[in-house]
């Protein structure tokens, strides 16, 4: 199998003998839109469920979770959120004045 | 005594990790070592000491010519194992991410990739990372005795170089042939822009109708003495700007003093790249766009009308 990897500074064309595990980035392919017939057919396809017992595994075969999540929260945004609407020329003047006061223009 | 081992395939990344290590090593009672692999490794040691390494392990063995993650993971494993390192920090570059996972498996260590920060809580390392596509910020700890953490570039500030000294040890490694083979390397179109270092940044998104309209943005950027960044569709789908200009989760993480967002709705995949800006300004014609939730100043308006006027006004300042 041959694949192109997008690295920081270059593209690498890499070869490997099978079996191969490849992780691909999004956008690798455009999924086609299935036809109505295909959607209907898909509903009739058999679903095979595998659980641990079917694979001959017990709880002991699974690795312990190695990380503990202490919290998982939306990041806090502490921004001024001053939004100008309406008269564009006046708004631009106010914005530029504010940016000068913030000291973020030039230098 | 904790022994922390640091490796990054890009030296700048290693310097950032070393700078962090230098800051926390006293509270952790830790030693900070770094690994240098491949051609020219030994010669870089002085710089690594200058950023805070106590010890360097280096090897210039021929097997370390190209970066093969399986070979490099083996190399780091042997170094970590024989020298009793419990914590390995790796720069979360594209190569580093793969390396971290492979190394953790070999070390039987817990692994967190793409950390955006590490906080000390007593002797514990609390790792912060974006999860759920960048929508949430998670704090996690590794419960395993051995830990591998890959840290995103620019997460730690690089310290000032000091006249550091330490011990540089050449290691002899037993390395196997890699399982993959690089058959070709293709350079990328030269755009040596460094958005991460920009003091002022102008980002453009899907609000731009066509490539021919880029001068609109360029004029503003020039007036502000800013670099131009963009969202993923512009760099990847349409290729109006180079990949090096993509800002966000899969692109660059920037910390400018001023960031101006033009025609950008504010998808989290992009905004994680500008969140650390000092002041954020946005221009968007949709006043309900999520970008207005995270700005200091916003103008509701069409970029085609606002931006030229803004450029003109700024020229008079």
Image: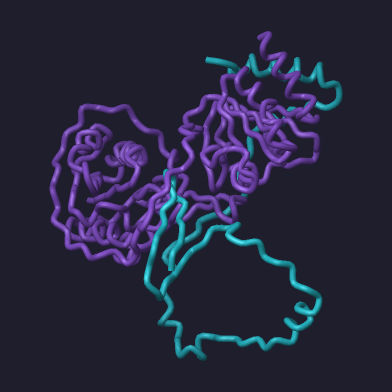
Chain assigned cyan:
A
Residue B121: image location, x then y, percent: 40, 48
Q: Residue furthest right?
A: A86
- Report the side of A38 relative to B73 (left or right): right
Say if residue B136 shows up in the picture.
yes
Q: Is residue A106 above or below residue B22?
A: above
Q: Residue at x 33, y 36 (%)?
A: B19
Q: Residue at x 29, y 37 (%)?
A: B22
Residue in front for this viewpoint, A101 or B259: B259
| Res. B275 image quadrant | top right
Residue in front for this viewpoint, A30 or B8: A30
Q: Residue at x 81, y 16 (%)?
A: A90
Residue A44: image location, x then y, percent: 74, 87
Residue A34: image location, x then y, percent: 74, 72
Specify the colour of chain B: purple
| Res. B16 image quadrant | top left
Q: Residue furthest top?
A: B316
Residue B148: image location, x then y, percent: 35, 56
Q: Residue at x 34, y 62 (%)?
A: B181
If the image is split into quadrants, where does the N terminus of chain A sit? bottom left
């Amino acid at each position: 199998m041959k694949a192109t990897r997008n690295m920081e500074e270059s593209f690498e064309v890499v070869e490997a003998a099978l079996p191969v595990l490849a992780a691909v980035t999004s956008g690798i392919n455009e999924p086609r839109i299935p036809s109505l017939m295909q959607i209907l057919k898909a509903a009739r396809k058999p679903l095979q469920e595998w659980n641990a017992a079917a694979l001959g595994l017990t709880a002991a075969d699974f690795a312990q979770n190695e990380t503990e999540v202490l919290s998982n929260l939306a990041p806090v945004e502490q921004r001024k959120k001053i939004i100008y609407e309406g008269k564009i020329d006046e708004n631009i003047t106010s914005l530029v004045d504010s940016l000068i006061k913030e000291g973020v223009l030039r230098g | 005594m904790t022994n922390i081992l640091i490796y990054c395939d890009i030296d700048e990344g290693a310097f950032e990790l070393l700078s962090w290590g230098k800051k926390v090593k006293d509270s952790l009672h830790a030693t900070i070592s770094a690994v240098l692999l491949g051609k020219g490794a030994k010669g870089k040691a002085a710089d690594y000491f200058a950023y805070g390494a106590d010890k360097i392990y280096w090897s210039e063995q021929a097997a370390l010519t190209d970066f093969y993650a399986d070979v490099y993971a083996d190399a780091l494993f042997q170094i970590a194992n024989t020298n009793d390192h419990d914590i390995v920090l790796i720069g979360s570059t594209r190569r580093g991410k793969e390396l971290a996972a492979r190394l953790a498996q070999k070390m039987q260590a817990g692994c967190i990739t793409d950390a955006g920060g590490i906080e000390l809580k007593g002797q514990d390392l609390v790792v912060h990372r974006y999860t759920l596509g960048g929508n949430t910020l998670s704090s996690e700890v590794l419960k395993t005795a051995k830990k591998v953490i890959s840290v995103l570039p620019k997460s730690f500030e690089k310290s000032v170089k000091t006249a550091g000294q330490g011990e540089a040890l050449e290691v002899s490694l037993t390395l196997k042939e890699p399982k993959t083979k690089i058959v070709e390397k293709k350079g990328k179109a030269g755009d040596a822009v460094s958005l991460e270092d920009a003091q002022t940044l102008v980002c453009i998104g899907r609000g731009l109708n066509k490539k021919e309209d880029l001068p609109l943005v360029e004029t503003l950027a020039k007036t502000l003495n800013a670099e131009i960044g963009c969202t993923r569709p512009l760099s990847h789908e349409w290729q109006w700007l180079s990949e090096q200009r993509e800002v966000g989760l899969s692109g660059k993480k920037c910390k400018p003093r001023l960031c101006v967002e033009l025609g950008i709705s504010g998808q989290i995949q992009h905004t994680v790249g500008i969140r650390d800006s000092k002041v954020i300004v946005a221009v968007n014609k949709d006043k309900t766009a999520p970008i207005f939730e995270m700005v200091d100043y916003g103008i509701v308006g069409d970029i085609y009308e606002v931006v030229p006027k803004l450029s003109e006004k700024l020229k008079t300042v």
